[in-house]
Structure formats: C-alpha cells, structure tokens
C-alpha cells in the first residue's frame, strides 16, 4: 500500500515537472530588468501589457532584480549555472564585456539579414555599444547620461539666482560654499551606488580615460583622474559642501530638501519630478572642468538574449523588437527618462516630441548626449573585481584619511594586475 | 534475525530520513565545496582548472580576508557581550514589573526577534540616516554629532552589530526570564532575612544562580553571531566602505557571487568551516562539562 502511494506521488511529481506539450499554449519568456517601482517599474508593466495584447502567443514574465546591474549579473550567473537563464536580460554597459566574454548567449548579427528594417534608425554610434570584439552581443536599449538635478528653493534661500546653476566645477565650489554658509545644508551629492558610473564621468570629464585605449592599463592614476577625485574628496572632507552618504540616503536627502544639487542619471527624472518634497526639481548638464569640453559616461543597458531553445529565442527577439519600436520606446522613455536609441523619435510629434516639450529636465540629457563617452566595461574574467576596486578606492577617497593620489595609485596597480595581458 | 538485530535495524531506519536530508543538504555540499576550493571556476564555464593550493595561498595573503576575520571576531565579541548584558538586565527589570504588565513587556521586547531581518534593516537604514535619522537627531539634542553610520569606516561595522543585537536579543531575553523564574523564591527570602540589600541579592543570588543560563547563552550567541551578520551587511553596507564592514560570511558571498570566483570563495568557505568546527567543538566540550541544571 505504502509503495503504491509512493509510486502515485512520484507520478504526480513527474507530471507536474514535465514541460507542457500543447503547441497552442503561449510561449512564456522571462525578462530580467533593474526597474524598481521608483525607477521605471511601472513602464515595464505597461510595456508587457501592450506587447501581450499584440502578441497573443507570447507571455512575458518580467522580473525585477535588485542591486542594479551588478545585482542582476549575480542572479544571471546563478541562473546560467542552473541552466535556467531568462530569455532576455538588461546588461549594464559597464558589464557588457564580462557578459559577452563569460556567458553563453545568442549572437544577434544574424538578425541584421533577417530583420534589416529593425536596424534602420538606430545610429551606428549607439549600436556600437552592443558591438564588442567583432560581434553584436546585445541591442542598446536604455541610453542615459548623468545630469545635475537641483533644488531652486535652496538656491533662492542662499540668495542665489536659481536660473543660473553652476556650469563648471569651479562655479559649483563657490555656489556650494554660499549654500552651505547661508542655509546650513549640503550643497551637492554625487551618486554613490555599488557602481562607478559617476567616478568614470569625473575621469572622462577632466580629460582622463578610465581605461587605456589598448585596454592594458586603467587610467585612474593619471593626473586628470587624481585631480578629479581629489576635488570630490575636498568637497566631502575639507569644505564639507558635498555629502558622503550611501545611495539611498543621498537620494532621499536630496528629495526631502536637505541637499541642493544631486548628480545622477536622467533615468530618474520621472521619479525626481514626482517625489521632490515641496520643490520643483530642475536639471542641467553636469558641471564641466574649467575650459574642457563636457564628457560623461553613458549609462544604461543592452538587451542580451540568453534563451536556449528556438521558440524562446524567437519570442525574445519579438519582445526586443517591440521594446525598441517607436511605440515601445515611447512608453519606455516617458516612464524613465532614458533617451530613445532611435533619436528621431524625440522630434516626432506622433511619439516623443510632446513629452520632450513638457519635460524640461530632458533637455539636460539631450544637451549632454553629443558628449557621451562609453561607460567602460573592464575586460577579462576579472573585470568585475576591477570595477569593485574603483568603487572601493572612491569610498576610501571620500573617507579622507589619505589624499586621492596614493589611493588611486595602489588601486591602479591592483587593477592592472587583473587586466588580461 | 535476532530481536537485537531487528531493533538495531529499526533504529537505523528511523535515523535514515534525517541522515538522508543531512547528507544531501549538508555533507554533500561540504564535500563539493571543499573539492571546488582546489579549482578555478566561474560557475558558468564548462572548464574547471585545477589550481592546487593556489586559492588558499591567495586568500591568506589577501588583506581583505584578514580584515574580515578581525571584523568577525570583533563583531562576535561585541555581539556576545551586548547580547548577554542587555537581555539579562531587561529580564531582571521585567520580572519587577507588576504581573499585569509583564506579558506586555515580554511581547514588546520579543517582537524584534520575529520580524524579518530584511525588514528590520530597511527600518534601521532610515534610523541611521546621518542628516535626519532618529539616532543622529536624538544625539544632536544631546549636543553630540553622530557619525555617518553607514558611510564611515569607523562606524559601519558597529551599525551592523547594533542591528543584529536588536534583532536577536529577544531570544536570550526569554531564556533569562525562564532562568529567573526557575530561581526558588526561598533563596531570596533567606538572603533578605540575613539582611541582604537589593544590590546584594542581584550580585550574590541572581547572578550565580543564573550561571548555567549565562553559559548557555554565551556559547550559543558566540557561535551564531557571525551567521547573523550576513543580511544586515548585504542590505546596509555591502561590506563597505572600502571593506570596513566586511566579515567572513559576507566575504564568501562577495568572492563567489560578486566576483564569480567560485573556487576562491570555496577556499574561504572551507577555512571558515574549519574555524567554526573548532569553536563548536570547544562549545560542546564546555557545555557538556559546565552546564548543570541540578540544584
């Protein structure tokens, strides 16, 4: 009797795990993203709804992954090890080299022949973000630039003209001191999540390079990088006009009126606009270094396909095509502030022109866009550690126990040893 | 089959399910992880390269490993001290409250133990906010400038210790309440007849008679403390700033799932396992020989 019961239980268990064979069933694909409820999450849900209404045969199981792009990569690696990867995932530009080099995925060059219409209208320099070592590994989806949000009320309270926010770091240091003296509040917060996007932006901005052109050395010990990071340290430690806070703390402190300026992604403009407590948030391009041209690291992600069977891959490609279609890109840009890879949508009255006309903060991103530099993804199997070394160096710089030069020199030595020879 | 053999067989049959579970979820991973510690593998690649003792050599020459070890020791000591003193004092205090209110206090003091650690951390994240969190705001009222709890290397590990103690002290508190209830009232009466003051009662009756409870609490708390550090580390600081709040449990995770060096992480895990195996053996020995509940 017991054996019979056991056999029955086994049969039930087996039938529950067997794949559904009915061809009429829709294909369900998993889509992994980093869009939390405060960072484009609602836009993802809307995209899924619109897509599923048009493609009856495909269901999208969208899954938010915490911990931004690094967190998503961790989950992805685990899912690949378990041989159950999502069909499509967002890979941050800073991690594309690692993902393309280490993860089994679908190369997308074949779609250039089968779907030439899709590729029309995406500029080459944008497409290049997914093109690594000779193959198309991902389709650029989110394109973002850092901007400087600011609280005009705090400018006014400090007796400053809110229509003239600082344009260079030298301006910012002066304005910042005034804000601190007059209001007692912090002047600025540069985002400090578990990535080094703003750090790379500072290095690019001061005329340095996060990684040498041949990819053999990091450029963090260059005079430009050392000077830029020293400036950040001085603001945090010497003049105390910059707040040294964790990412959640800093963002909340800005939104609740405790900090006058905040450098972070244009991808947050919707969240900023809706959550600024009692003030009308504005945005301008990040400050320049003296007479040097503006240069910022490009944020955002490519969509890579990890599907392992043909039906899943086909559905994944349909989903990607929709996400980048004028309709999909419009929902995406409105809900996040990411710039559309198809630049012409921004001026198309049928799609994004009304939005850009009504969202003045987006102008800051559009002005920055021509100066966008890559968010360097450190190559090789140890690329993720190299990223972390830069994050740790920044944390030490901001603690202010040593000047930035020895910190960055040591960090560069460590990183150079991990780069592929 | 003799009666004796049959009994033995039955005993093994009863043990089998438990052993099977332990084998699958404890012993096999232990063996697998130790094996992995001699390889270089990123969890995805089909290639496992054997590297001998290289992972161990790299680990002992890694500054972060030693920092994590020191932090874990520091946290374990502070955590144990706080998690013995606070519950003891609270239990003694609660026993003095009128019995009507005693249960209310017990529930209130035990409640942090039952909420999820992740939720507790999210709440503490805002309490630690240096600009307007409740902790620094209160300190400011006293004229003290509180630290930037989570972004200063000097305070980050303490923030984690505070959250962990707050989250777990309820369990020891209950043990102490039980220990106090077990002390016979005649002991106090006899001491009072002899003219002992309240302080003397606490010093010469309560403390000695709670000794078995205290030893038990000390040993279990010390061994469990490093395991309790992981979630608050992950949510509050990610081991930062600049590794200042890293600890052994988090380091293993970082090496394995942030850098995807599974072999290297396994080497760290194996060393941590051996360290705690030793500590647990010591705990067993002490518990066997020192904790007696007989009167």
Image: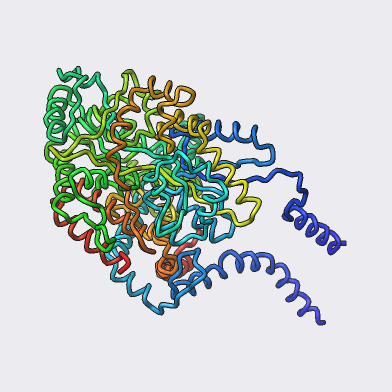
- Using residue A33 as the reference point, say whether residue B82 is left or right of it: left
User: Residue B250: horizontal and vertical position, in percent?
Assistant: 39, 56
Q: For this rendering, which residue is in front, A90 or B291?
A: A90
- Using residue A73 as the reference point, say whether residue B125 is left or right of it: left
Q: Quadrant of residue A252?
A: top left
Q: For this rendering, which residue is in front, B132 or A419?
A: A419
User: Residue B81: horizontal and vertical position, in percent?
Assistant: 34, 52
B116 lies above or below B271? above
Q: Residue extending furthest right?
A: A1
At x 43%, y 42%, the residue is B91
Q: How many marks?
A: 0
- Using residue A17 as the reference point, say whether residue A381 is left or right of it: left
A191 lies above or below A85? above
Quick one: quadrant of the N terminus of chain B? bottom right
At x 50%, y 50%, the residue is A304
Does residue A181 appear in the picture of this structure?
yes
A272 lies above or below A249? above
Q: For this rendering, which residue is in front, B283 or A271?
A: A271
At x 60%, y 42%, the residue is A61
Q: How is the image coloured?
A: rainbow
- Using residue A284 as the reference point, say whether residue B175 is left or right of it: right
At x 52%, y 36%, the residue is A325
A406 lies above or below B193? below
Q: Quadrant of residue A388?
A: bottom left
User: Residue B77: horizontal and vertical position, in percent?
Assistant: 33, 56
Q: Residue extending furthest bottom?
A: B1
Does residue B215 appear in the picture of this structure?
no
User: Residue A223: horizontal and vertical position, in percent?
Assistant: 13, 52
């Amino acid at each position: 009797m017991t054996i019979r019961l056991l056999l029955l239980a086994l049969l039930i268990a087996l039938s529950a795990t067997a794949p559904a064979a009915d061809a009429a069933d829709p294909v369900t694909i998993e889509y992994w993203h980093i869009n939390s409820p405060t960072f484009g999450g609602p836009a993802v849900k809307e995209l899924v709804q619109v897509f599923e209404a048009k493609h009856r045969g495909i269901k999208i199981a969208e899954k938010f992954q915490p911990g931004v792009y690094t967190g998503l990569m961790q989950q992805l690696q685990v899912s690949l090890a378990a041989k159950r990867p999502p069909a499509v995932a967002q890979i941050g530009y800073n991690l594309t080299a690692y993902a393309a080099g280490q993860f089994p995925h679908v190369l997308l060059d074949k779609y250039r022949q089968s779907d030439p219409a899709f590729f029309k209208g995406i500029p080459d320099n944008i497409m290049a973000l997914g093109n690594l070592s000779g193959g198309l590994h991902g389709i650029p989806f989110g394109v973002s630039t850092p901007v400087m949000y600011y609280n005009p009320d705090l400018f006014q309270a400090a007796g400053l003209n809110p229509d003239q926010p600082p344009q260079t770091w030298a301006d910012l240091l002066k304005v910042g001191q005034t804000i601190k003296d007059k209001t007692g509040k912090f002047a600025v917060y540069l985002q400090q999540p578990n990535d080094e996007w703003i750090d790379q932006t500072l290095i690019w901005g001061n005329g340095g390079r996060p990684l040498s052109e041949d990819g053999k050395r990091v450029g963090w010990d260059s005079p430009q990088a050392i000077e830029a990071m020293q400036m950040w340290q001085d603001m945090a430690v010497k003049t105390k006009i910059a707040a040294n806070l964790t990412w959640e703390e800093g963002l909340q402190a800005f939104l609740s009126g405790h900090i006058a300026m905040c450098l972070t992604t244009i991808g947050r403009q919707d969240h900023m606009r809706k959550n600024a407590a009692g003030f009308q948030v504005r945005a301008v391009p990040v400050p320049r270094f003296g007479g040097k041209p503006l240069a910022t690291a490009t944020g955002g992600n490519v969509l890579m396909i990890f599907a392992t069977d043909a039906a899943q891959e086909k559905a994944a490609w349909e989903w990607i095509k929709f996400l980048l279609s004028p309709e999909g890109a419009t929902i995406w840009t409105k809900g996040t502030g990411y710039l559309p890879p198809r630049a012409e949508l921004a001026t198309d009255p049928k799609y994004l022109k009304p939005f850009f006309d009504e969202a003045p903060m987006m102008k800051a991103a559009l002005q920055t866009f021509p100066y966008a530099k890559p968010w360097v993804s450190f190559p090789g199997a140890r690329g993720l550690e190299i990223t972390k070394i830069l994050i740790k160096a920044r944390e030490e710089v901001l603690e202010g126990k040593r000047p930035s030069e020895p910190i960055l020199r040591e960090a560069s030595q460590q990183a150079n040893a991990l780069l592929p020879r | 089959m003799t009666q004796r053999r049959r009994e033995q067989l039955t005993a093994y049959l009863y043990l089998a399910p438990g052993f099977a579970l332990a084998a699958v979820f404890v012993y096999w991973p232990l063996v697998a992880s130790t094996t992995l510690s001699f390889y270089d593998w990123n969890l995805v690649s089909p290639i496992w390269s054997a590297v001998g003792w290289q992972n161990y050599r790299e680990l002992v020459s890694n500054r972060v490993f030693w920092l994590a070890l020191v932090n874990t020791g520091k946290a374990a000591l502070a955590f144990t001290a706080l998690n013995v003193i606070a519950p003891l004092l609270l239990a003694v205090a609660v026993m003095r409250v009128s019995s009507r209110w005693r249960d209310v206090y017990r529930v209130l003091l035990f409640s942090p133990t039952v909420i999820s650690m992740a939720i507790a951390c999210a709440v503490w994240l805002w309490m630690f906010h240096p600009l307007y969190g409740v902790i620094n705001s209160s300190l400011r009222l006293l004229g003290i400038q509180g630290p930037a709890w989570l972004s200063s290397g000097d305070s980050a590990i303490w923030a984690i210790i505070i959250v962990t103690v707050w989250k777990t002290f309820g369990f020891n508190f209950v043990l102490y309440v039980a220990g106090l209830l077990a002390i016979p009232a005649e002991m106090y009466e006899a001491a009072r007849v002899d003219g002992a003051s309240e302080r003397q009662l606490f010093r010469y009756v309560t403390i000695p008679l709670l000794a078995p409870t205290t030893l038990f609490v000390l040993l279990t708390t010390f061994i469990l403390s490093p395991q309790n550090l992981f979630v608050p580390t992950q949510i509050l600081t990610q081991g930062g700033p600049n590794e200042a709040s890293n600890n052994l449990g988090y380091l293993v995770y970082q090496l394995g799932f942030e850098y995807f060096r599974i072999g290297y992480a396994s080497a760290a895990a194996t060393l941590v396992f051996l360290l705690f195996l030793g500590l647990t053996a010591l705990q067993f020995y002490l518990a066997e020989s020192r904790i007696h509940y007989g009167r």
